[in-house]
Image (cartoon, grey):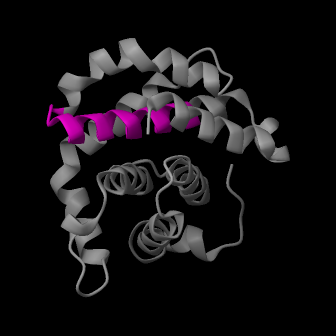
């Protein structure tokens, strides 16, 4: 699936939803950063290029399109760099968390690259960015999974399970909404 179609899918999902069309600019800028971090991660996975080496070309070619499609001038660069750096620095740990949470008989090798990159980004945010509400993280990465046409239920279940059991136990047991 091309970069443009994925961005259009995510943009359309948010603009068709009454709440999504009213989302504050800061939230849309963060959504653009999340999408960009997943797309960069996927690109690096497919090409075998190190994540940080792939970043400059990715930003030159896709960042403005992603921002424009999500109706913002620029994505949240600080959030983008934090997520990308977190994935880069903790990839082995993130993959181990994913592997440990899979059903019996499943290995991380069975997970599609797209799902794997989405899970890495989501887990990093749940663990490394406690100032962002867990339900917002779950909602955003479920939207990204949907835009990529991957198994939203799988992505959401794994992220939700880790949030409840490992990273955000008290937050997830309290009633609340995504931002």
Quarter of the image with the N terminus in it: top left
Magenta residue check for 53: no
Q: Main secondary structure of the magenta part?
A: helix
Magenta residue check for 34: yes
> How many numbered circles does the render carry?
0
Q: Work out whether residue 22 or residue 7 is closer to the camera in this orientation and state it.
A: 7
Q: Quadrant of residue 53?
A: top left
Q: Residue furthest front?
A: 1
Q: Residue at x 34, y 21 (%)?
A: 58
Left or right relative to 62: residue 146: right
In percent of width and height, residue 77 lies at 46, 23
163 vs 41: above or below: below
Q: Residue furthest bottom?
A: 104
173 vs 61: above or below: below
In percent of width and height, residue 177 lies at 72, 60
In percent of width and height, residue 7 lies at 55, 33
Q: Work out whether residue 92 or residue 166 is closer to the camera in this orientation and state it.
A: 92
Left or right relative to 137: residue 24: right
Q: Quadrant of residue 161?
A: bottom left
Q: Residue at x 55, y 58 (%)?
A: 138
Magenta stretch in the rendered image: 31-50
Q: Residue at x 22, y 60 (%)?
A: 95
91 vs 46: above or below: below
Q: Work out whether residue 164 or residue 122 is closer to the camera in this orientation and state it.
A: 122
Left or right relative to 11: residue 2: left
């Amino acid at each position: 699936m091309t970069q443009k179609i994925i961005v259009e899918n995510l943009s359309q999902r948010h603009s068709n939803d009454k709440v999504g069309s009213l989302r504050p600019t800061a939230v849309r800028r963060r959504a653009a950063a999340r999408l960009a971090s997943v797309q960069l991660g996927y690109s690096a996975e497919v090409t075998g290029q190190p994540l940080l080496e792939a970043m400059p070309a990715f930003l030159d070619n896709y960042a403005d399109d992603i921002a424009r499609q999500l109706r913002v001038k620029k994505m949240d660069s600080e959030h983008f760099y934090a997520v990308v750096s977190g994935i880069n620095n903790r990839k082995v740990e993130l993959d181990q968390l994913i592997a440990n949470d899979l059903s019996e008989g499943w290995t991380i090798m069975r997970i599609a690259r797209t799902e794997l990159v989405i899970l890495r980004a989501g887990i990093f945010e749940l663990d490394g960015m406690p100032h962002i509400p867990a339900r917002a993280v779950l909602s955003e990465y479920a939207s990204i999974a949907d835009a990529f046409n991957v198994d939203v239920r799988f992505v959401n279940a794994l992220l939700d399970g880790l949030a409840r059991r490992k990273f955000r136990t008290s937050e997830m047991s309290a009633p609340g909404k995504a931002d």
